[in-house]
Image (cartoon, rainbow, N blue to C red):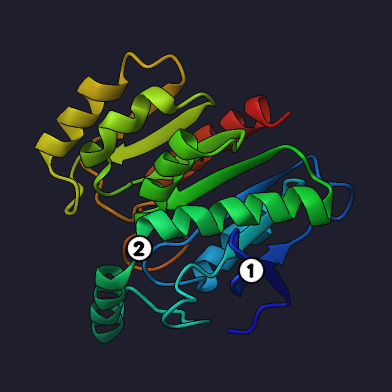
Amino acid sequence: MEFAQSVPTLENDGSFGVYVARPSSTPKAAIVVIQEIFGVNAGIREKCDLLAKDGYLAVAPDLFWRFEPGIELDPDVEDEMQQAFDYFGKFDFDQAVKDLESTVHWVRREEGVQKVGCVGYCAGGRLAYMMAARTDVDASVGYYGVMIDKMLNESHAIAKPLMLHIPTADGFVDADAQKAMHEGLDDHPRVTLHDYEGLDHGFATQSGKRRDEQGAQLADKRTAEFFGKHLA
């Protein structure tokens, strides 16, 4: 896909595209929408559009730009799912956090919106956790974040509110990982964890085979209330 806006990196050694959805009036805040391993695809763009309808400036950066700019994949197509796993293997999470941080800076500088949250899915869920621990983003939400259990040593740095949605039957985050997340984060004053009994990875995708309607609506309602409180 083509992006209408371009954001410079923190090091100013390149730039990447962002999908921007604007509300009909002055934004009440901004939310950076963090992609899964499928790029800024139709589902991610729809999430941005829904946030814009709710009054937010929504921005989804192309985090795969360093090796495949503009890619968008469908997880319900087996070949494209395999391609996504290949990209995931090349993906540098530390670098992605820097690109996300530069997106937050761009929103504050160029769009003039100072309150900025982020919401991420899958790999983006892990990045939402990393954003909460490493940046000054105002509030973060992660859906079915992968490998967060390997990064609990960073939890002490979380200074702004973070919410994580955890499906208990997640094929990519096993019971031991979920247990470690609860043990490491349940007592954290800035972190809220929600379990979704029997649901699998991807349950809150906008469309496709992975979506669970009831679970998605519940998680999205909690997310809306969370941002309504912490980005006000």
- Check disc 1 and report the residue beneath it: 18
Pinpoint residue 10: horizontal percent, then vertical percent: 60, 58
Kindly report which numbered mark, 1 or 2, lies closer to the viewer in this rendering: 2
Image disc number at residue 224 = none
Residue type marked 1:
Val
Please name the residue shown 43% across and 59% down the image: 95
Location of residue 41 in the rendering, given as x and y in whole percent from the top left corner? 50, 73
Specify whether residue 57 is in view: no
Q: Which mark is residue 92?
A: 2
Mark toward the start of the polypeptide (1 vs 2) = 1
Vertical position of residue 170 compared to residue 115: above or below: below
Q: Is residue 47 left or right of residue 148?
A: right
Q: CA distance from mark 1 to mark 2?
A: 18 Å
Amino acid type at mark 2 = Asp
Q: Secondary structure at mark 1?
A: strand
**92 to the left or right of 147:** right
Q: Nearer the viewer, residue 88 or 7?
A: 7
Most foreground residue, 115 or 22: 115
Q: Tell which of 66 and 111 is nearer to you.
A: 66
Where's residue 133, x and y in %? 44, 34
Residue 222, above or below 102: above
Q: Quadrant of the C terminus?
A: top right
